[in-house]
Image: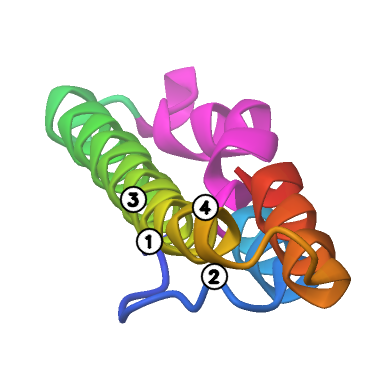
Amino acid sequence: MAAPSGAAGCEDFAEFQELLRVMRTIDDRIVHELNTTIPTASFVGKVDAGQTCKELYQSLMDAHTSRERIIKNCIAQTSSVVKTLREEREKAQDDLALLKQLRKEQTKV
C-alpha cells in the first residue's frame, strides 16, 4: 500500500487534512495488513513470512517518512508566510485585512 506521492499544497487546509487521511490508510488498516501478511499454518511453507513482514515494515516506514516530510514542508511554508505577514503588519498596523490574514495563517501553523 503506497503513499501518495507529489507535493502537497498547504493553502487549502481541508485538502491537506484529506491528503493526510489518505496517507494514514496503511496505519488505520494495520490489523488487516498483519493478518494478510503473516501466513496461516496451512501456508507457512508457501509464503516467506520474514520477507513479507520486511515489506510491510518498509511500507509503513515509507508512509511515515512521506507524511513527516509533507507536514514539515507545510509548517515551513506557512511559517514563512506568517513571518512575511508580520513584517507587513509592522509597517501597516491599521490594516485589518492584513491582521485577519495573519491570524488565519497563524491558526494554520
In primary-sequence order, the first of circles 2 and 3 is 2
User: For the residue labelled by badge 3, is the local secondary structure a helix, a strand or a loop?
Assistant: helix
Secondary structure mostly seen in the magenta stretch: helix
Towards the viewer: 108 or 95: 95
Corner quadrant of residue 30:
top right
Q: Is residue 38 left or right of residue 108?
A: left
In primary-sequence order, the first of circles 1 and 4 is 1
User: For the residue labelled by badge 2, is the local secondary structure a helix, a strand or a loop?
Assistant: loop
Q: Which residue is mark 2?
A: 10
Q: Which residue is mark 4?
A: 86
Identify the magenta region. 23-43
* Residue appearing at x 53%, y 53% in the figure: 90
Assign the C terminus to one quadrant of the image.
top right
Identified by mark 1, the residue type is Gln
Disc 4 to disc 3: CB gap under 8 Å: no
Q: Residues within 10 Å of mark 3 (few under 14, many from 20)?
A: few
Q: Which mark is residue 76?
A: 3
Q: Which residue is mark 1?
A: 77
Percent coordinates x, y for residue 4 in the rendering: 41, 73
In primary-sequence order, the first of circles 2 and 4 is 2
Disc 3 to disc 1: CB gap under 8 Å: yes
User: For the residue labelled by badge 1, is the local secondary structure a helix, a strand or a loop?
Assistant: helix
1 or 4: mark nearer the eye:
4
* Distance CA(mark 4)–CA(mark 3): 15 Å
* Total marks placed: 4
Disc 1 to disc 4: CB gap under 8 Å: no
Q: Residue 60, relative to residue 89: is it above or below?
A: above
Q: Residue 83, relative to residue 61: is it above or below?
A: below
27 in the magenta segment: yes
